[in-house]
Amino acid sequence: MVEGQAICETCGHTRDWHDRDAERARRGADPTVERPCYREVGGAPCRCGGFRESGAFAMQAGSRVMSGTAPGLGILAVAGIVLLLVVMGLGLLYAYRSQAPSIPEVDVSKALQDIDAGRVRAVTIIENKATLEFRDSPAHKEQTTVPQPDTILAKAVSDYNGAHPSQAIELKYVQDGQTFGVIGSILLSLLPVFVIGGLFYYLLMKARARS
């Protein structure tokens, strides 16, 4: 049922000014010209070209009401989907961070003590950060900061390997560019969020094209 007091989104006039039957009742005769809006503004016909029923539907004068989604509801739906994607992204990022436990930071003197005691299996140096892997467990690691160029930790490893060739410590230098693997892992964990967001955007644009 069309509301007679619904307001036109273009001209601001009520619904009855867009209805031919209502205009016929006002004039007592058929309108001479079919127009979207029969109200005159300043002696000239209103230029209105559409009508929004109760803020929810748009139609041309003389046609049936077209069903659609209110702009407010569309904005709320988009905001809800965006919020859901943000929550999912944070959840995936938290899951990734929880799977990669943080490595405890120690000073260089503590790292040298562990090397001299033979507890270290391998040392990996990336720029000014050295990661020590222990012999007792692959998950047992510690990290320390070394000067650049490194003249302390590498020398300690070399001295230990010279004294204990049967239990030599593996010393590895890694270029900084390889650390981008961490960023790649994070982006990979967020890939489902991007896919869902792209799919939602595609469906939204397709729905708008049909309306």
Image (tube, rainbow, N blue to C red):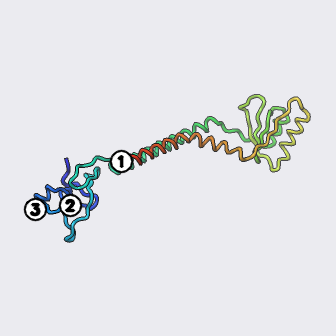
Q: Amino acid at mark 1?
A: Arg
Mark 1: few/some/many CA within 10 Å (<14, 14-19, 20+): few
Q: Is residue 179 left or right of residue 47?
A: right
- What residue is disc 3 on? 27
* Comparing labels 2 and 3, the label whose residue is closer to the camera: 2
* Comparing labels 1 and 3, the label whose residue is closer to the camera: 1
Pick whichever, 41 or 144, lies toward us.
Answer: 41
- What residue is disc 1 on? 210
Residue located 65% across and 36% down the image: 101
Whole-percent x, y for residue 7 in the image:
24, 57
Whole-percent x, y for residue 179 in the image:
70, 44
User: From this viewpoint, which residue is outermost toward the right?
Assistant: 163
Residue located 85% across and 45% down the image: 152
Residue located 42% across and 44% down the image: 203
Q: Secondary structure at mark 3?
A: helix
Query: Distance between the Cα atoms at labels 2 and 3?
Result: 15 Å
Circles 1 and 3, Cβ within 8 Å, touching? The answer is: no
Query: Distance between the Cα atoms at labels 2 and 1?
Result: 26 Å
Mark number, residue 35: 2
Q: Secondary structure at mark 1?
A: helix
Whole-percent x, y for residue 10 in the image:
28, 60
Where is residue 9, by image quadrant? bottom left
Query: Distance between the Cα atoms at labels 1 and 3?
Result: 38 Å
User: From this viewpoint, which residue is outermost toward the bottom?
Assistant: 42
Q: Amino acid at mark 3?
A: Arg
Mark 2: few/some/many CA within 10 Å (<14, 14-19, 20+): many
User: From this viewpoint, which residue is outermost toward the left?
Assistant: 28
Location of residue 23 with respect to 168 vertically, above or below: below
Q: Is residue 211 left or right of residue 103?
A: left
Going from N to C along the chain, the mark reached first, 2 or 1, is 2
Q: Amino acid at mark 2?
A: Arg
